[in-house]
Amino acid sequence: MTGESLSALALSVRVAILATAINTIVGVPLAYLLARRRFRGRAALDVLVTLPLVLPPTVTGYYLIVVLGRRGWLGAPLYAATGWSIAFTWYAAVVAATVMALPLLVRTARAAIESVDRDLERAAHTLGRSEWQTAMEVTLPLARNGIVAGLVLAFARALGEFGATLMLAGNIPGRTTTVPLAIYTAVQTGETGDALALVALLTGLSCVVLIVAGRLGARAT
Amino acid sequence: MPPASDRSRLEVQLFSRMSTFTLDVEWSAGDGVVTLFGPSGAGKTLTLQCLAGLVRPERGRIVLDGRVLFDSSTGVDVPPQQRRVGYVFQGYALFPHLTVAQNVGFGLRDRPRAAALERARAVIARLGLDGLEDRYPRELSGGQRQRVALGRALAIDPALLLLDEPLSALDLPLRQALRDELRATLADWGAAAVLVTHDFTEAYRIGDRIVVYEAGRVVQSAPRGELLWQPASEKVAYIMGIRNVLHGTVLKASPDRIQLRWRGQTLEAVNSPSRSYLPAPDTPLAFFIRPEYVRLIRKDRGPADPHHHMNLMRGVIVAEEDWGTTWTLRVRLDAPGEPAQGTYDLEVEVPRLVHEILEIDQDRRWEFSIHRGSIHVLPS
């Protein structure tokens, strides 16, 4: 493999790991809230989190530009204050991968949390545990397999993210070119040998992920 | 069995509108076990959840041993963590990822570690769970699971113990054995307890007092013996599954006797002086006769004596059911008009031995007698 392919691989892995870490911190509490709490705006939050799953990735990417781009709602004030914009940096690839992978984690983890018998939580409450303690000692441990399966799926999704990444991070060789983007570039320029190696690698990795997620999912039920 | 004192330990008053029905109940209880009895969906489990603080009713008041747990008028709502109420859930809700010892000790975390371990060990020993400490719930039998659930709730030394259908997850033979074991355990621990069941035998066996629920309301609350013989209404009799609930008209009522007319017969029943129920003549009246209290007159001992045999009737057996140890006979009386219960007037239950000795399968025509104390009037 060429140096460019290797650097794309290294970037992809780094982006996927970071995106999965952020997903763990944001997605698990989000899944818990959606599964167990009734609050105003819950349905809207549910739709917002799930949208990237059904929208074309380019549309999600477009919204990310609208929010984070140099002239975006958040991006403009940030650029005015610091002269820096997240667009076309590798951080943008992390943001795009995070947003695209979030619904996979939230939906899987939420289903696992919802399948925990509520009487177990009620029992913990009568035995002195607060809601937080109950979540940490009862609900989340019992939903663990489902949550891990969701994280594995989210990692795979982050690794393979293309459309939204291209919109927000661009395709700058050595800086924002992840494996899917490298494959696209390789095929476009006729360097099929390199593309094939990356294709085989991603396919193999995805198979492993699906097997692991499937086993965890089976154990969860 | 500890005597049920008149001292009220638990006062419950709840009002809560749900999507399908409205819970609106008020009852109180002294020492011993109270059973909430009634059909599914009557609000029994919801009541337990309100008592434990897991569900907040719209209005109401819950006082346990003088301690106000909930009072909507003053805004008191003690959270479930601080109510010290033990809850045995339907299906037990044991933590599947924890061992027996960890389950039993779950509510003891605020105690010093050594004391908590000692307490868990003592509870495990007292409930006969020694040797199972390191097992997981899935490795236990149904009866063992029930005891772990009971132990987990009792370990926190609860001021009140709540049990939701604690026997319904068990097979019938085990269920009968554990019913008596549960009764003994509750008496042994002396905890005030509220038990929910839809099985009258269970309600009667375990409860000192029975509160009858129907569609979110209390239709009767009475000591168990009183409920058995004096259901407050036809509705209560129906929920209890009482057979031979019949309708006649009043001939004459005095404080200790009621004469009534039914299917061309004049029946004499005992009135309950304590209820001072004195309906006017010709008032329609519901009453019931327990099938096992209808006597068959033996033919080998001469003709029936109307002075000795009260409420004498004649009829023919039109159908019968074999229940193993007993037979249920369906009797149509020699009286004109439609039978009271479709094809028959009375259900009569006789022990299998009597059925054999009297050769009832050969002989279908009998005389019957019912003691006036066995005809129970249901106030409308």
Image: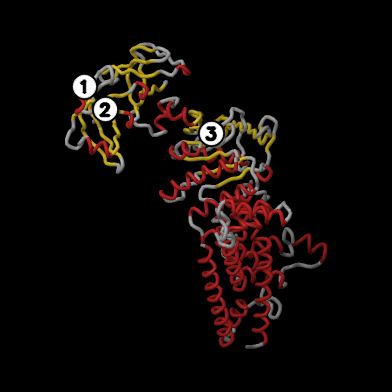
What is the three-letter code of the residue carrying label 3?
Leu
What is the three-letter code of the residue carrying label 2?
Asp
Q: Quadrant of the N terminus of chain A?
A: bottom right
State the mark number for residue B85. none
- Whether callout 3 and callout 1 share a subunit is answered yes
What is the three-letter code of the residue carrying label 1?
Ala
The residue tagged with tag 2: helix, strand or loop? loop
Looking at the image, the residue that sits furthest to the front is B301
**Residue B315 appears in the figure:** no
Q: Write down the chain letter for disc 3.
A: B
State the mark number for residue B335. 1
Which residue bears the numbered disc 3? B23
Q: CA distance from mark 3 to mark 1?
A: 45 Å
Q: Quick one: label 2 or label 1, which is nearer the N terminus?
A: 1
In terms of image quadrants, where is residue B131? bottom right
The residue tagged with tag 3: helix, strand or loop? strand
The residue tagged with tag 1: helix, strand or loop? loop
Q: Are marks 2 and 1 in contact (CB under 8 Å)?
A: yes
- Whether callout 3 and callout 2 share a subunit is answered yes
